[in-house]
Amino acid sequence: MSLNWLEEELKRLKGENLYRKRILREGLKDFCSNDYLGLKDHPRVVERSLKVLKEEGLGSGASQLVSGYTKHHRELEETLARFKGTPSCVLFGSGYMANVGTIPLLAGEGDLILSDELNHASLIDGCRLSKASRVVFRHRDYEQVENFLKRERHRFGRVLLVSDGVFSMDGDMADLKALSDLADRFDCILYIDDAHGTGTVGRGKGTLEELGLEWKENIVLMGTLSKALGSYGAFVCGSEELTEYLVNKARSLIFTTSLPPAVCAGAVESVRIIEENPEMVSKLRKLSERIYLQLKELPVEVKFSGTPIIPLIVGEERKAVEIAGRLREEGILLQAIRYPTVPRGTARLRMTVSLRYEEEDIELLLEKLSSLLRE
């Protein structure tokens, strides 16, 4: 079969200002990285990673169930379980793999999944891969969830409530108190993707800690190593029975090579740094607040919910792409986020705050943004 249709599809994407291409970040000041705490090149993280790299080599060599599970993997799992306040933890190759591997195992045929409409794409795909019935509820509308469960809970076996902890595009937080209460009242499992909450809220321990909640057996916590922890990979925390089940059944864990040991060692060091220096998290919050107060003076809608994700809502896809392109010409990387990542008409420049920023970096960004937006 001919692939000529690909050319037409690419033309359509370009015509709708939805065409994407990778940008080399070298030579650009990066204002959209998820390295919130600046740990990816922290001297202690690099030193620990290099030490293990020299001892173990570059790759792990096999899947976890063959020969790719080392003392460094186990140490990281034990560290994360303690950090998150859960009995157990299991590693995955990425956040995407964790979500698509875990969610279909928690709810299947005859079960129900209730999912926030602004959940990350990996959560959406994990729900789609399940054979469970699926209901998407309005963003943070927990009254809608409650009303549905009152009417329909009796029709299903297991029920899974799925939500981001910190939503990646707007930076707002789920009301996990409300969701946890609903999970308890209606006998549900609560699945929290805390990729952007880990390291940024709750003394770095995440959204549950931020909201004063403790882990319970009906809560499944997923998180990533690739954002505030500055490493790569992901994890799922919960009961010992849960992680044992995932090791035996999660296809995205079983049938893929495990994380490199050096990556695991670096992530362990990142967690230790956060535990030893919880003031890093409060410093990030204060810096985010200050930058927001400066950004909101610009002629554009700016959202802020207390996390380091600050979207500048432009609206039109074309306009967002044009501004991002002009900023690159000025040496600034601030990516345009468009449909289908966000709803149509809400294209944005998604800024993320990092402790890596120097004062002159922030001043340069504000100066160039102000000039472009007013122009």
Image: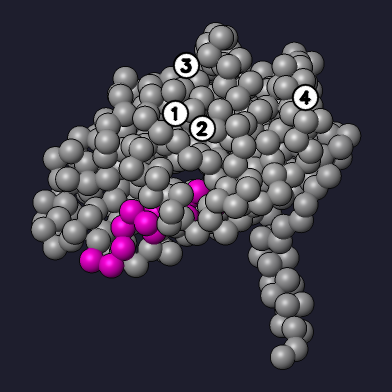
Query: For residue 54, which quarter of the picture?
Result: top right
Residue under label 2, please give it: 77
Q: At 58% from the left edge and 13% from the top edge, which residue is drawn? A: 280
Which color scheme did the rendering employ for the protein? one colour
Using the image, tell me which numbered label, if any, was put on residue 51. Answer: 4
Precedes in sequence: disc 4 or disc 1: 4
Query: Residue 57, percent across and down?
Result: 79, 38
Closer to us: 226 or 137? 226
What is the CA distance from the residue labelled 3 to the residue labelled 2? 19 Å
Disc 4 to disc 2: CB gap under 8 Å: no
Query: Residue 288, percent across and down?
Result: 57, 20
Residue under label 3, please give it: 203
Three-letter amino acid code at the position of disc 4: Lys
Residue 68 in the figure: left or right of residue 10: left
Residue under label 1, please give it: 81
Closer to us: 352 or 314? 352
Query: Residue 370, percent across and down?
Result: 72, 28
**Label 3 crowd bin: few (<14), some (14–19), many (20+), radius 10 Å:** some
Three-letter amino acid code at the position of disc 1: Ala
What is the CA distance from the residue labelled 3 to the residue labelled 4? 28 Å
- Screen quadrant of the C terminus: top right
Residue 276 in the figure: left or right of residue 321: left
Q: Describe the element under mark 3 as helix, strand or loop.
A: helix
Magenta extent: 97-110
Q: Which label sits in the foreground, 3 or 2?
A: 2
Q: Describe the element under mark 4 as helix, strand or loop.
A: helix
Point out the residue furthest to the bottom here: 1
Query: For residue 372, which quarter of the picture?
Result: top right
Residue 295 visible in rendering: no
Q: At 75% from the left edge and 83% from the top edge, which residue is drawn? A: 3
Disc 2 to disc 1: CB gap under 8 Å: yes
**Label 4 crowd bin: few (<14), some (14–19), many (20+), radius 10 Å:** some
